[in-house]
Image (cartoon, rainbow, N blue to C red):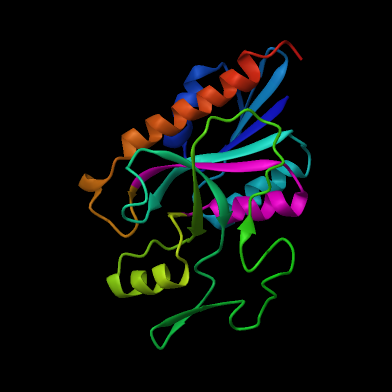
Amino acid sequence: MHLLFVAATLPEAERLIQQFSFTKKENLYSVKVNNHLIELLLTGVGSINTIYQLQKYVANNNPDVVIQYGIAGIREHFTELGNCFFITEDCFADIGVFENNEYKNIFDMNFSDANQAPFIDGKLKYKPNAVLKLPTILAATSRTVNLIESDAARLTILHKKYNTDAESMEGAAFHYVMLQTNMPFIQIRSASNIIGERNKLKWKMKLAIDHINELILKIIEENILKQPHA
């Protein structure tokens, strides 16, 4: 099996790097375990970095499954901070215009068709085609932004427009490339903070990073370490 893990930042992936004797070439880490190939791609933060780095990678590689993982903000009362979940659908939530106390995206303005592939009703939906043993975790919807919003009025508008469970800065970009290239994928996140909360003392960053990495190591154990040599 060839597993590619995708993370935005080094802190989110550092524990995985420490666990295996990876060889590093630029932002790609690779290691053979039981003749299975595990790779880790660090994309950098945001949609532009994610799309560029993934597109560059998939131009010359064809992994069996691609797993994006990292932390995310969640809406209040969705789950406890630190808990992990997988994303059933994602969307770009900051391509459009704010006007008259309303947010309109490119589909609302008829600049693009909300049902033109890979979009379905303006969403980028997970396809359960990954041949992978996964622990049972919570399902969630998510939105992707390149600008973190803390203004209460704008947050209310965004919550009304995109009633999602979570928010990240890379998820929709990941889904977009995977769906366009027809690669099996899954996005997994852990809750580090409440969306809009900028007081870092109220965040659970370390807990979220610890929990998501424990989950990733379990996935590797079940799908690589416990499997016979390839």
Q: Residue at x 31, y 64 (%)?
A: 150
**31 and 83: which one is in front?**
83
- Quarter of the image where the N terminus is located: top right
122 in relation to 130, above or below: below
Q: Evaluate whether residue 108 shows in this view.
A: yes
For residue 53: magenta?
Answer: no
Position of residue 180 measured from the top left corner of the image (x, y, whole percent): 74, 54
29 in relation to 58, above or below: above
Count of labels in the image: 0
Tell me which corner region of the image, top left, top right, bottom left or bottom right, holds residue 3.
top right
- Quarter of the image where the C terminus is located: top right
The boundaries of the magenta stretch are 168-192
Q: Residue at x 33, y 40 (%)?
A: 205
Position of residue 155 measured from the top left corner of the image (x, y, whole percent): 35, 69
66 in relation to 213, above or below: below
Position of residue 224 measured from the top left corner of the image (x, y, whole percent): 64, 18
Q: Is residue 123 left or right of residue 36?
A: left
Tell me which corner region of the image, top left, top right, bottom left or bottom right, holds residue 106.
bottom right
Q: Is residue 71 left or right of residue 117?
A: left
14 in relation to 158, above or below: above
Q: Residue at x 51, y 66 (%)?
A: 93
